[in-house]
Image: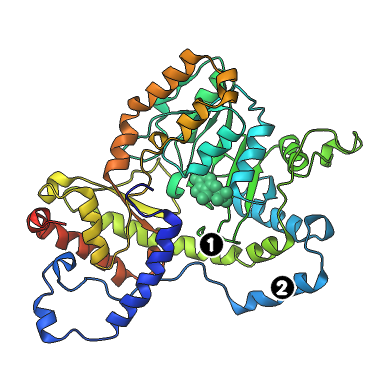
Amino acid sequence: MKNHLTRRGFIRRAAAGSAALAWLGSRRPPLAFAAEAGKPALLGGVPVHRGGWSDWPKWLESWEPAVVKVLRSGKWYRGDGGHVAEFEAGYAKLLDAKRCLATASGTTALLVSLHVMDVDAGDEVIVSPYTFIATYNAILINKALPVFADTDPATLTMDPASIESRITERTRAILPVHIYGMPCDMDRINAIARKHNLAVIEDACQAWLAEYKGRKCGALGDLACFSFQNSKHIPSGEGGAVTGNSDELLDRCHAFHNVGRATGSFKGAKPYFTRGSNYRMQQFQAVILMQQFDKLVQETARRRENADYLSAQLKQIPGIQPARLPENSRAVWHLYPFRYDAEHFSGLARDKFLQALNAEGIPCSGGYHEQYFDGLLDEAIHSRGFKRLFSAARLKAYRDSFEELKGNRQVCATTVAMTQNLLLADRRDMDHIVEAVRKIQTHSATLAKAGG
Ligand SMILES: Cc1ncc(COP(=O)(O)O)c(C=O)c1O
């Protein structure tokens, strides 16, 4: 993330910072130090939070025998043992989805889904711009154009009202992203998709157990994709899954991820009845993931409880706006975001606010930036392949359309986000977050004037 920490790098730094802060926290401040307590930490005062935060990821010794058993068996590949299939059954059950296919990563889950939903070279996919870059990449790798719907500044997710004007005769699918584990407004998105005969693929890579109107993300569209990369709430280093309720689609996904081998309803057809690749999960990953089902459920409850408390407290502070969720929906908070209005903080710039909050011992970042200006889309647009597939007029209009993403621009410029591991702390630590924001507001004029 330009000018900010990347999410993964951020977790590493937050954990490293935690060690230093834990050291600080173990010592009582000397008296002269205490006198500085009211002063912002960025200007030399004492940080509000000095206890550090939970490391991530965490493993338990009790997981070791199952992992060692796989190691000793020599059956590491999916085809040699049942652990991956066992994980798939368990994960589908957890989401109340009919089927799950484990994959090597969230990116490969997206590639499988886009292929199976027939997104082909020269097609267009309407997607949220406010997402991890892998979502853009998966569409680009398919030689399709990621056409960005705008972001709703109140929810930080895809604004359904901005979808229809972006549909062209080439549009094949809508790819909403439940970013930070906050469900998109799926009823409105699905209604538009049905009206225009488009596929819906949920990017649920940050939304394990998130709920939209009482139903879990993962079976709200045609297919959904999850990531189990190391920073995720249920991590296995790398890993991913495609979920859904259609046997036929999941059988197609299975075949495509396994070099095109016929499975399920396609058995009996030619052994390689379709094109395919190798996006298989290993047995080790499945075993590590299965140990974490209960942990995920328990930690999700804790994150929710802390996030609800934080939102209730933070929204009382003028200039702080927690994200709005769809009715009867529950987020899982891969990051906990709020929008920051500098006007209520003596004009203190968002990036300076981030510095000040970090200095108070509250690790935070600005979330995603306007990544479509970074050059990767220009690279695609100017590639031989895209020039063959799209007219020059279409590519120019496409590039110009980035300027229209006003909601997304606002979100990128004003968001403050904290990683999920902070939400695993206790109530007193949540109070530190609120106290730190209030402290910065109290001293915002001084901070705004201070250089650096
Ligand atoms: C929203 C989103 N989409 C896609 C991905 C890609 O997942 P992976 O890193 O497992 O390939 C991620 C993971 O970081 C993500 O957060």
- Please give the count of numbered marks on the rendered protein: 2
Is ligand 1 closer than 8 angstroms to the Cβ of mark 2? no
Whether residue 249 sits left or right of residue 334 in the image: it is: right
Do the CB atoms of the residues marked 2 and 1 lie less than 8 Å apart? no
Circle 2 residue: 66
Q: Nearer the viewer, residue 382 or 2?
A: 382
> Which residue is rendered at x = 54% and y = 38% of the image?
137
The residue carrying pointer 2 sits among few (fewer than 14), some (14 to 19) or many (20 or more) residues within 10 Å by Cα, namely: some
Which colour assignment does the render follow?
A: rainbow
Cα–Cα gap, marks 2 and 1: 21 Å
Tell me which amino acid carries mark 1: Val
Percent x, y of residue 339: 27, 46
- In the figure, 76 relative to 445: above or below? below
- In the figure, 285 relative to 2: above or below? below
The residue carrying pointer 1 sits among few (fewer than 14), some (14 to 19) or many (20 or more) residues within 10 Å by Cα, namely: some
Percent x, y of residue 201: 58, 35
* Residue 8 visible in the picture: yes
> Which residue is rendered at x = 27% and y = 75% of the image?
50
- Picture quadrant of residue 308: bottom left
Percent x, y of residue 266: 84, 36
Tell me which amino acid carries mark 2: Ala
Q: Nearer the viewer, residue 234 or 119?
A: 119
| Sequence-first disc among 2 and 1 | 2
Residue 297: assigned label = 1
> Which residue is rendered at x = 42% and y = 62% of the image?
11
Q: Nearer the viewer, residue 138 or 208?
A: 138
Whether residue 441 sits left or right of residue 222 in the image: it is: left
- In the figure, 196 relative to 77: above or below? above
- In the figure, 198 relative to 74: above or below? above
